[in-house]
Image (cartoon, rainbow, N blue to C red):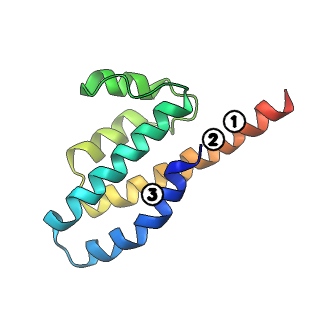
Amino acid sequence: MQFFHAYWKERSETLRVLFRQRDQALVRKPMVRCIAAFIDQLCWSAGAPVASLVHDDLIQQIKVAPCAPLNIDERLGYLLRQPARYLAFIQLDELEQEFTKKRAASMRRLKKD
């Protein structure tokens, strides 16, 4: 269930290099793929696939995911609007860290029960 964590670790350094080149067209496609993988991971952490690609429906599904980071709707909205910005890269990295921590805490609680 740690797909995105491994996926992100593999790609984040490559993305960092691409951002240093300051070519937004070059970085857009790999960032969109990483954002999509993050969304997929969030939905599957709640036990369901992505139900809809309609923005409002997608945000509603993600907001109720048990491991969703704080303010996920606003933060994810920014990522979807501006995927080629360096700030989006930083935001996605922070979301990945928060998701990983919440997921680990959730798994520990399940093991205790």
Disc 2 residue type (three-letter) = Arg
Residue 21's quadrant in the figure?
bottom left
Q: Residue at x 18, y 67 (%)?
A: 26
Does residue 91 appear anywhere in the picture?
A: yes
Residue 106, percent from left and from top: 69, 35
Q: Are marks 2 and 1 in contact (CB under 8 Å)?
A: yes
Q: Which mark is residue 97?
A: none
Q: Is residue 79 left or right of residue 98?
A: left
Q: Residue at x 31, y 51 (%)?
A: 33
Q: Is residue 94 left or right of residue 53?
A: right
Q: Is residue 47 above or below residue 42?
A: above
Measured Cα–Cα span from mark 1 to mark 3: 20 Å
Disc 3 residue type (three-letter) = Asp
According to the picture, the residue beneath numbered tag 2 turns out to be 103
Q: Residues within 10 Å of mark 1 (few under 14, many from 20)?
A: few
According to the picture, the residue beneath numbered tag 1 turns out to be 106
Q: Residue at x 24, y 53 (%)?
A: 83
Q: Secondary structure at mark 2?
A: helix
Measured Cα–Cα span from mark 3 to mark 2: 15 Å
According to the picture, the residue beneath numbered tag 3 turns out to be 93
Q: Nearer the viewer, residue 68 or 52?
A: 52
Disc 1 residue type (three-letter) = Ser
Q: Residue at x 33, y 68 (%)?
A: 15
